[in-house]
Image: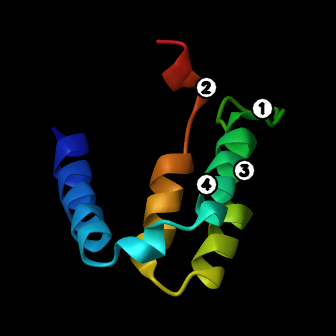
Amino acid sequence: MYELVVAVPLLAWLGFHIYRTPAQFARPMLLTWVIAIMIVDLLPVPTNVSMRFSLSFPLQLAVALIYANPAVAGAIAFLGTSDLRELRR
């Protein structure tokens, strides 16, 4: 239930911004950022604790600083974020 409460408004907000300013989401470089974040998220980070760490935060931060529109940065982060546990289901 919590996932729906978070994901549905986020997807509605992103959809509204994509509908309102489609030209900002049609840049080919955005796909490069999504793929880079996906690859970095899937790389394992060895640690001594049972928690999982990801090194994609610096890439997501770079996207947020490069693109002034928060919807573009949010869409890149939403589409690019992945986890190995999702693929093992």
Q: Which residue is mark 1?
A: 44
Residue type at the position of mark 4: Leu
User: In front of the other: label 4 or label 3?
Assistant: 4
* Residue 5, image x, y percentages: 16, 50
User: In front of the other: label 1 or label 4?
Assistant: 4
Q: Residues within 10 Å of mark 4 (few under 14, many from 20)?
A: some
Specify which label sits upstream in the sequence, 2 or 1.
Answer: 1
Secondary element type, mark 1? loop
Q: Which residue is mark 2?
A: 84
**Residue depicted at x 80% and y 37%:** 45
**Residue depicted at x 64% and y 35%:** 51
Secondary element type, mark 4? helix
Secondary element type, mark 3? helix
Q: Which residue is mark 4?
A: 31
Q: Which residue is mark 3?
A: 36
User: In front of the other: label 3 or label 2?
Assistant: 3
* Residue 24, image x, y percentages: 46, 76
Specify which label sits upstream in the sequence, 2 or 4.
Answer: 4
